[in-house]
Image: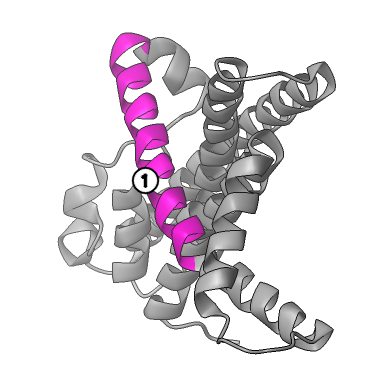
Amino acid sequence: MEVTGIAALGIYLLLAFVLPGFCYAFVFGLCFPQVITTVLKTLNEQREAPRTEASSSTKQEGMARALSSLTIPAITGGLLLSSVCFFVENVSRNVAPCFMDRVFPEFGIAQISKIEAAGKGALHLQVLSGEAIMHFNIGVGILLLAFAYLGFGRRRAALVICLFVTAFANIVDSSVLYQRASKAAADVVKQLTLGELAAPGGPSHSALGPMASSIRP
């Protein structure tokens, strides 16, 4: 089944930035349930029409509408927190480049673009790179929420442990996926370059040949 470039980009964005937002919202609800309860109650009261007698079905519908109203804040908040995670990644690459290049090697968006320009499908790489960024954002985001939770109010030790374990697990998963995506992109570009070199006319007829030396493995 052929997947268009727009669809592949949508899958990448969904994995890397949208899904982490719902994870953040869930963790935020665990850490600060009183905030979620207050917001839901306020939204429910604002949406309820004046009536003399409330029915249970009407209350359930109001709660469902209130929950649906949290979708946009969850996505928006997720994008904002993901931008902080991206900032953390960039700072880490500047502060500890050797460590980051070894543990979270860049898979190269430029490589994926060249693969697509050569007419080769890059859906697998889009999904792989999207998953890598997704787990990195989830791990760092949960870590930030855990520190915020430690700084406010009463703390539940079991929840703190679960948050740190979940954050660590996602960061480890992200490292594995970063390495797989980097290797997969480099292998595909290498195969394309070798194929072009073997074609009649050699490098002069290659779409990737002039650029191959500038591609980061």
Q: Is residue 161 visible?
A: yes
The residue depicted at 39 percent of the width and 77 percent of the height is: 5
Front one among 91 and 106: 91
* Above or below for 8 versus 98: below
Q: Is residue 123 visible?
A: no
Q: Position of residue 159 (x, y in %)?
A: 78, 26
**Is 105 left or right of 83, judged from the image as shown?**
right
Front one among 13 and 167: 167
Q: Position of residue 131 (x, y in %)?
A: 58, 50
**Is 207 left or right of 2, judged from the image as shown?**
left
The segment highlighted magenta reads 72-96
The residue depicted at 72 percent of the width and 18 percent of the height is: 155
- Toward which corner of the image does residue 98 lie, by quadrant? top left
Dot 1 falls on a residue whose secondary structure is: helix
Q: Magenta segment: does it hold 153?
A: no
Q: Which residue is mark 1?
A: 80
Q: Magenta region, mostly helix, strand or loop?
A: helix
Q: Magenta segment: does it hold 84?
A: yes
Q: Position of residue 100 (x, y in %)?
A: 44, 19
Q: Quadrant of the C terminus?
A: top left
The residue depicted at 29 percent of the width and 51 percent of the height is: 110
Front one among 195 and 126: 126
Q: Position of residue 164 (x, y in %)?
A: 70, 22
**Three-letter code, disc 1:** Leu
**Is 70 left or right of 161, judged from the image as shown?**
left
Q: In this view, which residue lies farthest toward the front?
A: 52
Q: Quadrant of the N terminus?
A: bottom right
Near mark 1 (Cα within 10 A), the count class, few <14, some 14-19 or many ≥20, is: some
* Above or below for 115 versus 87: below
The residue depicted at 38 percent of the width and 25 percent of the height is: 88
**Is 169 left or right of 152, judged from the image as shown?**
right
* Above or below for 17 versus 51: above
